[in-house]
């Protein structure tokens, strides 16, 4: 062997600038655990196929564990000369087991090796993110439960529309993050495919028991086509898509918290420990966490577009372009994890200003639909009732009053069907509690939704 495991046909050493340019150690350093797990499973598979002796497999596995120890203790200096994590591990293995290390790469290529490492890495990270999402969804449910009965305006077009329970609003986010969870679970299923045995692209001449390798590594399936296995990055694209949608949800929540913590809304108080001040304006308390999460959303979207563009039009099978996949992938993983972590910590400390939200729920003609519904209950057709209430709203606006602030005789100018019971129908409590249709904001529905979510979270 020369300086490099592939340089037999080369007549001059690699240019140093080329070594630096082609090295993937900046990202590969996060893959060493998975690379070593894969190599241990591979040497056992080689022994099972009779390619190496059982004793050799055990010696290689023991040597690989030593390499794992030294890398985890930070004792291995990574060098661009060795290009990637696969070569570093083999190099260190040779230091422990000598010439035997040269047998490890039989029936394997770095192409199926990196496909394996990336799948092992992403399976572990996706499981972690699913667990984080569970904790965050629990925090949202707890927030909904702690504020049960608090009214607030519900919005469309960012205009006050109809009163809702704050808890109903919080549970809308629970639904979004529950769908995210199911998207990650779904992506996990297609990630769970073992590529080793595909070798460079065409498979290998050795009769490897690939199902055995899959069992050793905790995969439920083996890849069906060696060419697809070394060139498929769909599992990353699916993860990045799910991560982008999840970041969209986080950005929407963030935007609401930024709005709600402003003086203009004044609906929530964010904990001091999760805000920062201004170096010049002493009065400031800024919602940095939601702002930064909102901003980080762009990184994850960018990563998705990066990876889609990287894979677009690539001919089969492996192309070195694909080495660039791990940069956006790992950045998206780390960004999403950090955003979920900070939200898990902050959410239990969000204080809802129920007096402010309740007063806001009672203003801005949010009971106009309910007045129309009231007239429908007295026998008027909805379209007619809509027109009649429209006139009442215009009149009340001119007097500078809300609908429920008009006297009975003032209201009766618009319809003789209006009676004393109208005021009940126009109250915030009634407006909320009468929306008892499944999925509506009535207190009993929202309490049931919270209960169902708690049971589901417990079972997950
Ligand atoms: N560092 C490479 C990657 O991330 C590993 C596979 C290299 N394969 C090769 N034939 N050079 O894609």
Image (spheres, rainbow, N blue to C red):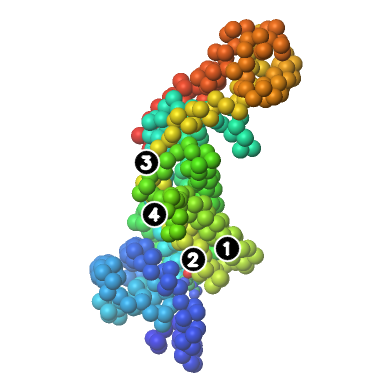
> Residues at badges 4 and 3 in contact (C-beta under 8 Å)?
no
Dot in front, 1 or 4:
1
Compared to residue 156, the image places residue 391 above or below, namely: above
Considering only vertical position in the picture, is 318 above or below 121? below
Q: In the rendered image, which residue does mark 2 sit on?
A: 327
Q: CA distance from mark 2 to mark 1?
A: 10 Å
CA distance for labels 1 and 3? 36 Å
Residue that mark 3 sits on: 349
Spatial CA distance of label 1 from label 4 is 23 Å
Name above or below for residue 33 compared with residue 272: below
Q: Position of residue 437 (x, y in %)?
A: 55, 20
Q: Which residue is mark 4?
A: 124
- Residue ranking furthest to the bottom: 11
Looking at the rendered image, the disc whose residue lies closer to the viewer, 1 or 3, is 3
Position of the C terminus, as image quadrant, is top left
**Is residue 220 shown to the viewer in this render?**
no
Residue 445: x percent and y percent?
A: 48, 23
Query: Which one is closest to the eye, mark 2 or mark 3?
Result: 3
- Residue at numbered disc 1: 306
Crowdedness near tag 2: few (<14), some (14–19) or many (≥20) residues, C-alpha within 10 Å: some
- Mark 4 → mark 2, Cα distance in angstroms: 17 Å
Q: How far apart are the two marked residues, 2 and 3, measured between alpha carbons?
A: 34 Å
Q: Residues within 10 Å of mark 1 (few under 14, many from 20)?
A: some
**Badge 1 residue CB within 8 Å of ligand 1:** no
Q: Quick one: label 1 or label 3, which is nearer the N terminus?
A: 1
In this view, the mark in front (4 or 3):
3
Residue at 62% x, 12% y: name it.
407
Q: Is residue 312 left or right of residue 206?
A: right
Position of residue 357 measured from the top left corner of the image (x, y, whole percent):
49, 31
């Amino acid at each position: 062997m020369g300086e490099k495991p592939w340089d037999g046909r080369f007549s001059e050493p690699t240019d140093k600038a080329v070594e630096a340019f082609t090295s993937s150690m900046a990202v590969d350093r996060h893959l060493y655990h998975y690379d070593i797990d894969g190599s241990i499973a591979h040497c056992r598979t080689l022994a099972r196929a009779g390619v190496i002796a059982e004793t050799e497999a055990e010696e290689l596995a023991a040597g690989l564990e030593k390499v794992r120890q030294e890398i985890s203790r930070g004792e291995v200096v990574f060098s661009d000369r060795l290009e990637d994590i696969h070569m570093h591990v083999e190099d260190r293995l040779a230091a422990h087991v000598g010439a035997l290390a040269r047998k490890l790469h039989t029936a394997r290529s770095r192409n199926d090796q990196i496909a394996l490492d990336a799948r092992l890495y992403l399976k572990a990270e996706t499981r972690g993110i699913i667990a984080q999402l569970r904790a965050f969804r629990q925090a949202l449910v707890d927030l909904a439960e702690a504020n049960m009965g608090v009214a607030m305006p519900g919005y469309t077009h960012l205009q006050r529309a109809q009163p809702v329970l704050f808890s109903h609003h919080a549970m809308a986010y629970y639904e979004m993050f529950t769908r995210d969870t199911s998207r990650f679970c779904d992506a996990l299923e297609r990630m769970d495919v073992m590529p080793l045995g595909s070798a460079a692209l065409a498979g290998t001449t050795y009769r490897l028991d690939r199902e055995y390798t899959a069992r050793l590594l905790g995969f439920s399936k083996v890849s069906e086509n060696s060419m697809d296995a070394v060139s498929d990055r769909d599992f990353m694209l699916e993860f990045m898509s799910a991560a982008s949608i999840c970041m969209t949800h986080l950005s929407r929540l963030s935007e609401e918290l930024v709005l709600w913590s402003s003086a203009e809304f004044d609906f929530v108080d964010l904990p001091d420990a999760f805000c920062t001040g201004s170096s010049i304006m002493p009065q400031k308390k800024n919602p940095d966490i939601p702002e930064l999460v909102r901003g980080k959303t762009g990184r994850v979207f960018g990563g998705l577009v990066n990876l889609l563009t990287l894979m677009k039009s690539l001919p089969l099978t492996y192309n070195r372009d694909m080495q660039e996949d791990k940069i956006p992938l790992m950045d998206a993983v780390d960004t999403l994890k950090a955003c979920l972590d900070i939200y898990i910590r902050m959410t239990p400390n969000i204080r809802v200003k129920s007096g402010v939200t309740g007063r806001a729920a009672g203003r801005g003609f949010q009971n106009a639909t309910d007045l129309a519904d009231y007239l429908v209950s007295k026998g008027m057709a909805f379209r007619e009732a809509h027109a009649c209430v429209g006139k009442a709203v215009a009149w009340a606006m001119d007097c500078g009053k809300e609908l429920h602030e008009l006297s009975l005789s003032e209201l009766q100018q618009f319809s003789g069907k209006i009676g004393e019971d109208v005021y009940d129908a126009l109250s915030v409590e009634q407006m909320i509690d009468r929306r008892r249709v499944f999925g509506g904001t009535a207190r009993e529905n929202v309490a049931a939704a919270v209960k169902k979510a708690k049971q589901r979270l417990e079972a997950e």
